Image (tube, rainbow, N blue to C red):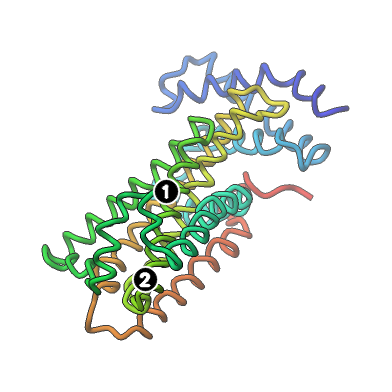
Amino acid sequence: MLAEDFIARKRVSWERLTALLNRAQRGLTGLSAEELQELGRLYRQSTSDLAVARRDFPNHAVSDYLNGLVGRAHGEVYRGRSTRARQVIRFFTHTFPHIFRETWGYTLAGMLMFLLPAMVCYAVAYVQPEAMLLVFPQFEPVLSNIQDGHEWWKSINEDGRAASSSFIMTNNIRVAFLAFAGGMTMGLLTLWVMVQNGILLGSVAGAAHRFDFADNLWGFVAAHGVIELSVIFIAGGAGLQLGWSILRPGLLSRRSALVLAARRAVQLLFGGVILLVIAGLIEGFISPSDELPLFVKLLVSLLSGILLYGYLFLAGRTQPDTEPSMTTKKT
């Protein structure tokens, strides 16, 4: 049986299950007795369909779609068996890193959208810093600060580090949300956000190296930069998932493909926001500190990178014994 035939036969029941789950978001009490019975029947049927899809079409998009649908249905049917705290813990120990690994290609694409413009602008700003003003007029005050040797980030401490840390978190989260939400414009806004931020970093870095200001710059950026940039890449990848599901839904309906991509993208964004809180704390308390030597900030950068990517690539590879697996493919 071809995947197309399998989808055509089962699509109606999957979409009906999705509709019931949408109505049950605030609790199963909103469903009638007949609908509860139907929900249970469709859940069991979809679980069987997932097993078939994993066996016969393991690399097809329908397997991912059913994996998300069954996982969502399981959460509603067995909601009473798991406390909210356990759900949150499970999200960070299993769900978030697992989805990151499943969608790492999109994150890589987001990273390239950022780094390629950054490298080009770095080269231009290093050779002729004033040329960047033609394409990026907002760069003028930054360039003036660099030429004057003014470490403008030290103003972070003027209103107190706690207040500044809160402002930094909010700004970083805003950028991440823009990159994510840009997916609904078929990825165009996501592309703009990634390129714009890449141009900014590349321009600043190039000019800093040109005017012997690099040690000052990286002494500030190094400590928080790994986590902050990684989350921006993840958010950009999440936005690209949304855009790609609209442009190329595959054999799924465009709505079903978008629902699948949106669920994964929102989970990535939520996990990323928590990481940005950590980056904001580092940027507010460690990065602008004059008391801490450069090697300490570089050590923070190294350790944060090891911990972050060790977590993203290694966590959640085994399922807890207390709950059935909804994300590990059967063999």
Classify 10 Å Cα crowding around label 2: few (below 14), some (14-19), many (20 and above): many
Q: How many labels does the image show?
A: 2
- Quarter location, residue 301: bottom left
Q: Is mark 1 on a helix, strand or loop?
A: helix
Residue at the spot x=40%, y=56% of the render? 131
- Looking at the image, can residue 44 be seen? no
Lateral position of residue 316 relative to residue 165, left or right: right
Classify 10 Å Cα crowding around label 1: few (below 14), some (14-19), many (20 and above): some
What's the CA distance linking mark 2 and mark 1?
18 Å
Residue at the spot x=20%, y=70% of the render? 154
Q: Which amino acid does label 1 sit on?
A: Gln
Q: Mark 1 points at which residue?
A: 196
Percent across and percent down for residue 327 are: 63, 46
Lateral position of residue 268 relative to residue 330, left or right: left
Q: In which quarter of the image is the N terminus?
A: top right
Q: Residue furthest left?
A: 159
Q: Name the residue under label 2.
A: 208
Please name whichever residue, 31 or 116, is drawn nearer the observer in this view of the structure.
116
- Looking at the image, can residue 144 be seen? yes
Please name whichever residue, 72 or 98, is drawn nearer the observer in this view of the structure.
98
Percent across and percent down for residue 106 are: 59, 47
Q: What element carries label 2?
A: helix
Residue at the spot x=61%, y=26% of the render? 256
Please name whichever residue, 76 or 262, is drawn nearer the observer in this view of the structure.
262
Percent across and percent down for residue 107 are: 56, 51
Q: What residue type is labelled 2?
A: Ala
Please name whichever residue, 238 or 326, is drawn nearer the observer in this view of the structure.
238
Q: Earlier in the sequence, mark 2 or mark 1?
A: 1
Nearest to the eye among marks 2 and 1: give it: 2
